[in-house]
Amino acid sequence: MKATTIAIEDKVSKLLAVLDKDIRHIQDSLSCLNEMRSLVVKRDDVTLGKLLESIQAESDSYTSNESQRQSIRKELANAFGCNLEQMTLSKLEASLPKGEKAQVTKRKARLRTLIKELKKEHLSTALLLSECARFNNLLLKSIFDFRRTGTVIYNSNGSTSRSALGRNAAFVNSQF
């Protein structure tokens, strides 16, 4: 019984280290989203490209932490005699003594807060990018649809005429 308890304590301490890495990863993701939005607004394509490359590299290296978390979770599920889907932080909290329970509770609360903030920041970034795409589409459509024969042009006295721009016409009609 005592060996099992020591094995569980060891697994819990490994899990806490993995959860700390998860917390740092989410914090880094939050700062990357903020920086990404800033770079999009500033139109700094070079720095944005570098940021996206670093995000991709970090994402590739983070997969080892995810597999380690799943491995520890599986070991804890075996130790507690339940299947993998049932082994959650809440179940772990309920099964641990006070000291370890407090540490797990602290990490769980911090992860929930960070995940909530990450969802909000992700939505903000997605909305910004969506608006940029919409604006770019409207801009391109207004430039390239200008040559269509159905386009109506108003002259300086208020009368209308159909666009009859030639092949070498400019995008902006400067005629008054």
Image (spheres, helix red, strand yellow):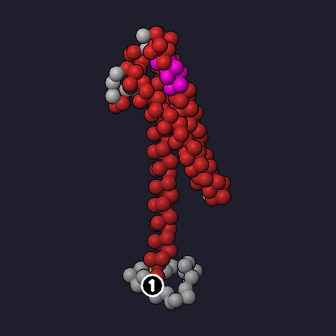
Q: Nearer the viewer, residue 3 or 28?
A: 3
Relative vertical location of residue 57 with respect to residue 96 in this rendering, above or below: below
Q: What percent of the width, then of the height, locates residue 71?
A: 46, 32
| Residue drawn 41% across the image and 30% down it | 74
Q: What percent of the width, then of the height, locates residue 163?
A: 45, 84
Name the magenta segment's main secondary structure: helix
Q: Which quadrant is the N terminus positioned in?
A: top left
Give the residues in magenta: 8-15
Q: What percent of the width, then of the height, locates residue 136?
A: 50, 64
Give the residue at mark 1.
163
Residue 149 painted magenta = no
Q: Nearer the viewer, residue 121 or 164?
A: 121
Q: Quadrant of residue 17?
A: top right
Query: Is any part of residue 58 visible from this angle?
Result: yes
Q: Which quadrant is the C terminus positioned in?
A: bottom right
Q: What percent of the width, then of the height, locates residue 90?
A: 39, 22
Q: Callout 1, which amino acid?
A: Ser
| Residue drawn 38% across the image and 25% down it | 77
* Horizontal side, residue 86 vs residue 15: left or right: left
Identify the secondary structure beneath mark 1.
loop
* Horizontal side, residue 88 vs residue 122: left or right: left
Relative vertical location of residue 45 with respect to residue 151 in this rendering, above or below: above
Relative vertical location of residue 63 with respect to residue 1 in this rendering, above or below: below
Image label count? 1
Q: Nearer the viewer, residue 18 or 36?
A: 18
Residue 11 painted magenta = yes
Q: Nearer the viewer, residue 168 or 21?
A: 21
Query: Is any part of residue 157 visible from this angle?
Result: no
Label 1 neighbour load within 10 Å: few <14, some 14-19, many 20+ = some
